[in-house]
Image: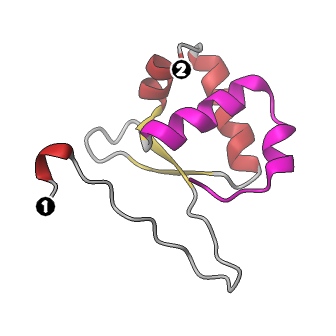
């Protein structure tokens, strides 16, 4: 889970909150994948991503499978000492040791 200022998230429109949750559960995703998961229009998702980028909650990266698209992910939470906090990697049920 991303450690962000809850007040900033609460001030966002509902569409941006939904995009945040989609990225939190399923990210990183392309804009097209976010549209499919959230069932919002492409225009609404673009606006929501802009709002999330403004408050520093979302990062945009190159999507190497198709350079015409961008990959969106939630920013890493930052510890009190200013260092990034690593999250434990998710294991697939088939690959758990």
76 or 67: nearer the eye?
Answer: 76
Q: Is residue 16 magenta?
A: yes
Q: Position of residue 28 (x, y in %)?
A: 43, 44
Task: Kindly identify the residue that appears in the image at 72 percent across and 56 percent down.
Answer: 4
Q: Position of residue 39 (x, y in %)?
A: 53, 13
Q: Name which quarter of the figure residue 97 lies in.
A: bottom left
Q: Is mark 2 on a helix, strand or loop?
A: helix
Q: Residue at x 16, y 55 (%)?
A: 96
Disc 2: which residue: 38
Q: Tell me the colour scheme of the image.
A: secondary structure
Q: In this picture, which residue range is highlighted in magenta?
A: 1-26
Question: In the rendered image, which quarter is residue 68 located in?
Answer: top left
Q: Residue at x 46, y 71 (%)?
A: 86
The percent coordinates of residue 45 (x first, y second) are 61, 25
* Spatial separation of the CA atoms under disc 2 and disc 1: 33 Å
Left or right of 81 on screen, residue 29: left
Nearer to us of marks 2 and 1 is: 1
Tell me where residue 44 sits by quadrant. Answer: top right
Left of 44 or right of it: where is 12? right
Residue designated by label 1: 97
Mark 2 vs 1: CB contact within 8 A: no
Which tag, 2 or 1, sits closer to the chain's start? 2
Label 1: how many Cα within 10 Å (few below 14, some 14–19, many 20+): few
């Amino acid at each position: 889970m991303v450690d962000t200022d809850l007040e900033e998230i609460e001030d966002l429109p509902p569409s941006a909150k939904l995009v945040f949750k989609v990225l939190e559960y399923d990210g990183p995703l392309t804009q097209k994948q976010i549209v499919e998961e959230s069932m919002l229009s492409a225009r609404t998702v673009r606006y929501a991503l802009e709002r999330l980028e403004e408050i520093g909650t979302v990062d945009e990266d190159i999507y190497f499978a198709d350079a015409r698209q961008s990959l969106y992910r939630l920013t890493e939470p930052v510890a009190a000492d200013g260092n990034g906090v690593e999250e434990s990697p998710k294991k697939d049920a088939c690959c758990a040791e």
